[in-house]
């Protein structure tokens, strides 16, 4: 993947992270984390997975050699 491809994926994952965090906040505010613990855990898993993938793409982008300068 090119650095631009990695950055696009990183940005899209950030949107997923933001949306999931907002959903978690609403779920917690409504007390649904206690009423629906299995669904709450699934949301936490989505958040964890998105953060892990974002970290992997960031590392991959940083580890890629820089293009030769002219």
Image (tube, rainbow, N blue to C red):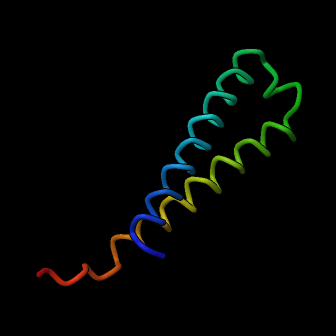
Quadrant containing the C terminus is bottom left
Q: Give me the residue at 63% from left, 52% from top.
A: 48
Farthest front residue?
70
Q: Give me the residue at 48% from left, 76% from top.
A: 1
Callout count: 0
**Viewer-nearest residue: 37 or 55:** 55
**Viewer-nearest residue: 19 or 51:** 19
- Relative placement, left or right, of 31 versus 18 is right
The percent position of residue 19, horizontal first and vertical second, equals 63, 34
Q: Give me the residue at 56% from left, 36% from top.
A: 18
Farthest left residue?
70
Q: Give me the residue at 34% from left, 78% from top.
A: 63
Q: Is 17 rendered above or below residue 7?
A: above
**Viewer-nearest residue: 8 or 20:** 8
Q: Is 31 rendered above or below residue 51?
A: above
The percent position of residue 6, horizontal first and vertical second, equals 46, 65
Q: Is 35 rendered above or below residue 4?
A: above
- Relative placement, left or right, of 22 versus 68 is right
The percent position of residue 58, horizontal first and vertical second, equals 42, 64
Picture quadrant of residue 49: bottom right
The percent position of residue 14, horizontal first and vertical second, equals 52, 45
Farthest top residue?
30
């Amino acid at each position: 993947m090119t650095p631009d491809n990695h950055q696009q994926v990183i940005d899209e994952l950030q949107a997923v992270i933001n949306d999931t965090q907002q959903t978690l906040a609403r779920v917690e505010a409504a007390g649904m984390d206690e009423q629906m613990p299995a669904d709450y855990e699934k949301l936490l898993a989505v958040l964890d997975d998105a953060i892990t993938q974002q970290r992997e793409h960031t590392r991959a982008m940083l580890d890629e050699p820089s293009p030769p300068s002219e």
